Amino acid sequence: MAGEIPDLEAQVRTGTGKGAARQARRDGMVPGIVFGGDADPLPINIPFNKLLTMLRKGRFKATLFNMKVEGHDDVRVICRDVQRHVVKDLPTHVDFMRLKRTTKINLFINVQVAGEDVSPGLKKGGVLTLVRPEVELVVTAADIPESITVDVSGLEIGDSATIANVKLPEGAKPVIDRDFVIAQVSAPSGLASQDDDEAEDVAADEVPTSEMGDAEASED
């Protein structure tokens, strides 16, 4: 299951509207809003440098945070939108949604691979391709997995592992309502090209033309 939920510290933003938002930016803050749940929307400010650092780490919109705001109870939130400057591509506003432990949300979860060391296809020189490094799942806020694991220990060259082969955490399910490939073992490029060459040789040298067939038939 997911590890410790990271803290996200914010300040209450006094005043609302464009004027208050502009002042926040002049003060080195990024204005935002926390909405949803059973509470009123809460205008907040987040230090620009801290927010930018988190954004650059990636997966910001797929991370559950424990938001800490002075004078308010801690609450679990997930980012729902980051508005950016059209030229500088820097954050100008951020929206967060409050979550209950039972709230269902869509998140992209990392895929880990197990069994590479014993896969017969890989032992024969096959190449493993992780078709989906992450999979979008519907999960509950209280049970967000850090990753899911696909087992390739039984794959031969040409075999694939699909989402049906992955044991998902309890209560989680894929957003895509069908089976789909997660990983596959392919022939090495050299072997594949050799097979192609052989296929071409067969087509050119071994398959008789219709004229040859007719000629042979007439000789009989």
Image (cartoon, rainbow, N blue to C red):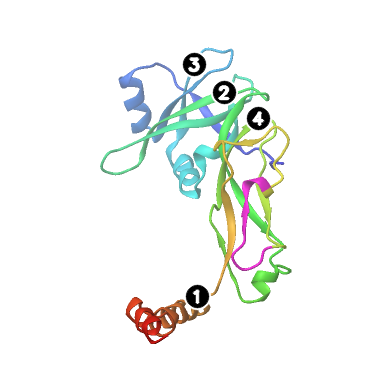
Q: Which residue is mark 4?
A: 140
Residue type at numbered disc 4 = Thr
Mark toward the viewer: 3 or 4? 4
How far apart in space, not on screen, are marks 3 and 1 (Cα)? 59 Å
Q: Secondary structure at mark 1?
A: helix
Residue 157 magenta-drawn?
yes
Residue name at image x 35 percent, y 25 percent: 21
Residue type at numbered disc 2 = Arg
Residue name at image x 52 percent, y 25 percent: 97
Mark toward the viewer: 1 or 2? 1
Front position in the image: 206 or 133: 206
Residue 33 magenta-drawn?
no
Residue 33 vertical position relative to residue 86 in the rendered view, above or below: above
Q: Quadrant of the C terminus?
A: bottom left
Mark toward the viewer: 1 or 4? 1
Q: Earlier in the sequence, mark 1 or mark 2?
A: 2
Label 4 Cα neighbours within 10 Å, binned few <14 / some 14-19 / many ≥20: many
Mark toward the viewer: 3 or 1? 1
Magenta extent? 155-164
Residue 80 vertical position relative to residue 115 in the rendered view, above or below: above
Q: Which residue is mark 2?
A: 98
Q: Which residue is mark 1?
A: 192
Q: Earlier in the sequence, mark 3 or mark 1?
A: 3
Label 2 Cα neighbours within 10 Å, binned few <14 / some 14-19 / many ≥20: many
Q: Which residue is mark 3?
A: 41
